[in-house]
Amino acid sequence: MLLTLGFGACTAEVDEILFQDKNASISFAEEAYEIDEDVDVYQNFEVNYSTTSSQAVTVDFDFVSEGFENPAVEGVDFELLNPTKTLTFGEGSYKNAIRIKVIGNDTVDANRQIKIKLKSSSANISLGFANGLKSEILITILNNDIEVDESHPLAELFGFYTEEEYLFEDGSLDPASGNSLTILPDPEDDTQVLIMNLWGIGEDVAMKASVDLETMSMSILAGQVMFVDPQHGAAKAVRVFVADNQLQADFAGDIVCQIDEDGNITAESWAVLVEAGAYGIYEKTILTKQ
């Protein structure tokens, strides 16, 4: 539209130079995607046809499981909802999608992975971009089942939570909150738990907390490193408080939390701090049991 308005009769010549048919491609919109293992989860994986032509075209795809330690199995872990493994882009159509349904279970198993790979097209159009980028998509089905030893003294706390953080300055909900985390047993101490993905730092990072069910309290242990910033160094979860109208950081004090009768956990004021300053300061954090 801009070329037509600005250059008039020159548009066709410019288009011919910049958008020749040899530049046409078919590609996924994303390179990787993670899906929770829940019953009846449906997911569309967008495939785009980039061309200036209105020519109709078809593209074949398939699932690739080789090379994965825990491959996802069609018919066991997921179901293809497309009628065939061929996508058709009709004349003047530039978007389509591969649709799958996740098959959930109650088994504690590892995350499973599968690739969807574009294989060939009816018009011999390039699949993906340079070096095959986006000619395939990696799908990870995330396990959401936890094996709970009911005899464990802290068994009632294990499971999935939604985390909401309220900003220190005005008590408003941090729009970046709402991530999911998991509480698991600490294999080294049955009076402690491991909090995975606190503050969205990743499921592979464990924050230790001690628990006292008699007082329905939990304490995130002081001095734990959440991540290391390449510029600012170690970022720690730190208890904070106000004294003499000044915000103070207590690097030696645990972050104390209260547990309600429904298993929800509320943490006192805390912050994610490095020597240079704070990434976030929170008046309270609520972990809602799922």
Image (tube, helix red, strand yellow):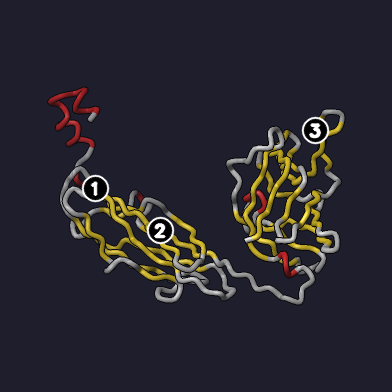
The residue under label 3 is 247
The disc at residue 24 is: 1
Does the image show residue 97? yes
Residue at 77 percent across and 46 percent down: it is: 268
- Position of the N terminus, as image quadrant, is top left
Rendered image quadrant of residue 116: bottom left
For marks 2 and 3 on the same chain, the one whose residue lies earlier in the sequence: 2
Front residue of 281 and 65: 281
**Residue 209 position (above or below residue 253):** below
Three-letter code, disc 1: Ala
Three-letter code, disc 2: Ile
> Which callout, 1 or 3, points to the residue nearer the camera?
3
Residue 208, image x and y in percent? 76, 58
Residue at 48 percent across and 66 percent down: it is: 113
In the figure, is residue 214 to the left or right of 64?
right
For marks 1 and 3 on the same chain, the one whose residue lies earlier in the sequence: 1
Whole-Å distance between the Cαs marked 1 and 3?
58 Å
Q: Secondary structure at mark 1?
A: loop
For marks 2 and 1 on the same chain, the one whose residue lies earlier in the sequence: 1
Residue 154, image x and y in percent? 77, 68
Front residue of 178 and 34: 178
Q: Secondary structure at mark 2?
A: strand
Q: Secondary structure at mark 3?
A: strand
The disc at residue 137 is: 2
In the figure, is residue 29 to the left or right of 238?
left
Residue 182, image x and y in percent? 65, 60
Q: Answer yes or no: do the residues labelled 2 and 1 have beta carbons within 8 Å?
A: no
Whole-Å distance between the Cαs marked 2 and 3?
47 Å
> Which callout, 2 or 3, points to the residue nearer the camera?
3
